[in-house]
Image (cartoon, rainbow, N blue to C red):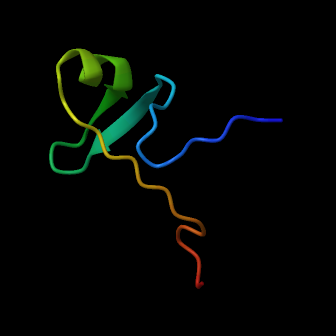
Amino acid sequence: MTDTIQVGSRVPDFTLETYDPRSGNFASFDLAAQRNAGRWTLLVFYPADFTFV
């Protein structure tokens, strides 16, 4: 059985590549670094990105 993540639960740390269209530069987002800095992070997931649904 797999563990599920519930609203309000802590998710595993991750890092991902980001892009800022205003500056045209790439950067990275590190969840552990955000937590250590005392910043809140809101994760939103939705299905069917860029589809006609």
Residue 40 on image: x %, y %:
23, 36
Give the residue at the far bottom of this rendering: 52
Q: Give the left or right position of residue 21, taking residue 49 as reference.
A: left
User: The C terminus is located in which quarter?
Assistant: bottom right
Q: In this view, does 42 lie above or below 36?
A: below
**Front in this rendered view, residue 10 or 28:** 10
Q: Give the left or right position of residue 43, taking residue 41 as reference.
A: right
User: The N terminus is located in which quarter?
Assistant: top right
The residue at 49%/56% (across/down) is 45
Give the residue at the far right of this rendering: 1
Residue 25 on image: x %, y %:
25, 36
Q: Is residue 53 above or below residue 33?
A: below
Q: Give the left or right position of residue 2, taking residue 47 as reference.
A: right
Residue 52 on image: x %, y %:
58, 84
**Front in this rendered view, residue 15 or 2:** 2
The residue at 36%/26% (across/down) is 31
Q: Give the left or right position of residue 37, taking residue 9 as reference.
A: left
